[in-house]
Amino acid sequence: MDSLSRDTKPGIDKMLLDQPGVVLESVARTFNVPLASVVARLPAAEQVTAPGELFVAIMEEVSNWGKLTLIVNTPEMVLEAKGPIGKGSMGRGYYNIPGAIGGHFKPEEFHSISFIDRTLMGKPSRSILFFNSQGSCVFKLYLGRQENREMIPEQVQLFAQLIEKIGDNKASR
């Protein structure tokens, strides 16, 4: 996904360094590149990327996490839905998720999945971004927050465990 020009990479890196909490979509728009290309430029401590073939396994894991925030971000809008992600099942070529935050997903269309650990809007944040083959983010899942706006500690732990599990899966290939 890193097909950036030699001229673009330093600009993205500088913007990420100079503005640590910058919204990643604004960086992508500034440089007219896919969001996945910006995510790939984040420091290793802030992102881990897994292959899209882990889509179903990741969705099954997060179905046990409780309330999350699902975000779909387009140039025209940012759509947010908060609640638990239901445990899905495969049927007719789709991974079907029941519930208030549900839908029908074609797992083979997901190219990569990035786990992001960085500051957003002045607060520590953890999210999972699901990318298609063009590097566009199809949707994001953000960890839930308590009433005091702090992330739910159990979800932070589950997020870290899932990253570790993915690392183990990648190593065993």
Image (spheres, helix red, strand yellow):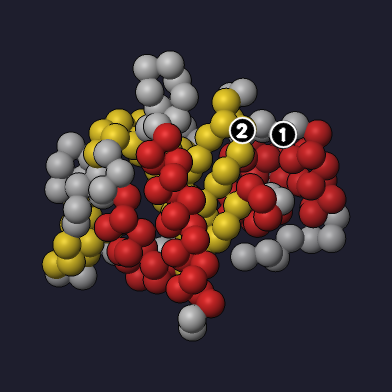
Residue 81 lies left or right of residue 148; in this view the side is left
> Which label is found at residue 112?
none
Locate the N terminus and report the quarter of the image it occupies.
bottom right
Q: Is residue 9 above or below residue 170?
A: above
Looking at numbered disc 1 in the image, what kind of residue is underneath it? Answer: Pro
For this orientation, the residue located farthest to the bottom is 173
Query: Of residues 38 and 76, which is closer to you in this image?
Result: 38
Which residue is disc 1 drawn over? Answer: 20
- Contact (CB < 8 A) between labels 1 and 2? yes
For this orientation, the residue located farthest to the top is 148
Residue 142 lies left or right of residue 66; in this view the side is right
Q: Residues within 10 Å of mark 2 (few under 14, many from 20)?
A: some
Residue 80 lies left or right of residue 172; in this view the side is left
Which is more N-terminal, label 2 or label 1? Answer: 1
Which residue is disc 2 drawn over? Answer: 119
Q: Is residue 112 visible?
A: no
Q: Secondary structure at mark 2?
A: strand
**Residue 167: x, y in percent?**
52, 67
Query: Of residues 154 and 58, which is closer to you in this image?
Result: 154
**Residue 129: x, y in percent?**
47, 50
**Residue 136: x, y in percent?**
51, 53
Q: Residue at x 39, y 67 (%)?
A: 54
Q: Secondary structure at mark 1?
A: loop
Q: Is residue 150 visible?
A: yes
Q: Residues within 10 Å of mark 1 (few under 14, many from 20)?
A: some
**Residue 9: x, y in percent?**
79, 54
Q: Residue at x 36, y 63 (%)?
A: 55
Q: Quadrant of residue 102?
A: top left
